[in-house]
Image: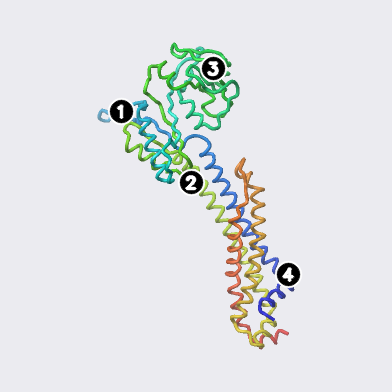
Amino acid sequence: MKLYQMVAKDIMRRKKRMMYAALGVVIGIMTVVSILTITHAGEARLYAQLEKYGPNLTIIPAISRLDVQLGDISLGSLTVGENYILEENIPEIRQIADNLIREALGIQDEGNIATIAPKLYVNTKVNGVDVVVVGVDPQEERKIKTWWEIKEGEYLERTDQALVGTVAGELLGLNIGDTIALNGSQVTIAGILGESGSNDDYQIFVPMATLQKAFGKEGLLSSIDIRALCMACPVEMIADAINNSIPGIRAVSVKQVAASEMGMMEKVNKLMLALAGITLAVGLFGVVNTMMTSVHERTRDIGIMRAVGASRNQIIKAFIYEAIIVGIVGGIFGYVAGSLLAYAIGPIIFEGIAITYIPQYFPLSIALAILITIIAVVYPAFHATKIKVADSFRSL
């Protein structure tokens, strides 16, 4: 009879004990797989939100505040720098952004790649109420703000139209077709935005040229939003290049703004993986205990094997074969249980998260389970090789 056949028969004879050994591995692998699956889904959701909502880069005027002092007397602070960005900088900004994206992703297309949406903010009164009116490029703004929905009416089609946020429309009593005066210029309400929970709900949007002309701010912008082609685009490099090339402006990466949130997620992930490691260690000791008990129960069998000429290597191999079988069983059931656990608790940890099973974790689960069981069986196997034939017969 071959060695692996003996191992298989022995496992079938001691099914309950092997199940207990596999159970510890299953729990450990289940914990690891569920944590990795939930973490992967959480990070994917965060990146998807950054990809879907808003820009990758925001460009603002490079103003700063200086503390003014006379000796030990503080005279307050002084704002230094222009409060606007020159519209003539847009072509250079686009060239920098598009060239770096082409270089990073190997794109040969000569057309525009990044979405660049300039904005001009003006505080004014509409129907006697203070409100912020935002000048935008209608087409580019729609590409940036993919979450915008038109509650009533239509989107901006002409230069004499306006788009009103939900809350602003209610407070100002504006309806589709109403006209409002912007410093003497008349615009017609073309549409009302659906509620988004952002500042957009409180603002009025008009075409850029219309607002610039009405308030004498031709060629001036308050900020510029840039949405790169993808989250893999080198937005930090784009920000650095813009900051180094164009004076008077400051480019800020949204990834930098989200760094603290991602850092917190990483810390939570490390804590959860540490707990998973402890669970795996407990499972490992469970396998060690089961195998040591197996050695004591099989003292006679091991002695007989030694008596008929079995070498120490063959005995060690027998235990390793058992460990591999336990590891495979534990890895398979651990992966399945971990995926199911992730489906159950994932939406609780991250609201609205979409959990999907990850096939790449299946071979990882089996490999990790086999590794754990082989490590766990090393001491029991070497202990078994020290059993003497005489000791085995005394145990009869």
| Image side of residue 58 versus residue 78, left or right | right
Residue corresponding to mark 4: 15
Sequence-wise first label, 3 or 4: 4
Sequence-wise first label, 2 or 3: 3
Residue corresponding to mark 2: 263
Residue 68: x, y in percent? Answer: 29, 28
Dots 1 and 4: beta carbons under 8 Å?
no
Residue corresponding to mark 3: 189
Residue at 60% in and 53% down: 358
Residue at 67% in and 74% down: 293
Sequence-wise first label, 2 or 4: 4
Specify the amino acid type for callout 3.
Answer: Ile
**177 or 102, which is in the foreground?**
102
Residue corresponding to mark 1: 74
Q: Nearer the viewer, mark 1 or mark 3?
A: 3
Distance from Cα at disc 3 to Cα at disc 4: 76 Å
Specify the amino acid type for callout 2.
Answer: Gly
Dots 2 and 4: beta carbons under 8 Å?
no
User: Does residue 90 sit above or below 107 in this rendering?
Assistant: above
- The crowd level at tag 4 (other Cα within 10 Å; few <14, some 14-19, many 20+) is few
- The crowd level at tag 1 (other Cα within 10 Å; few <14, some 14-19, many 20+) is few
Dots 2 and 3: beta carbons under 8 Å?
no
User: Does residue 186 sit above or below 302 in this rendering?
Assistant: above
Q: Secondary structure at mark 4?
A: helix
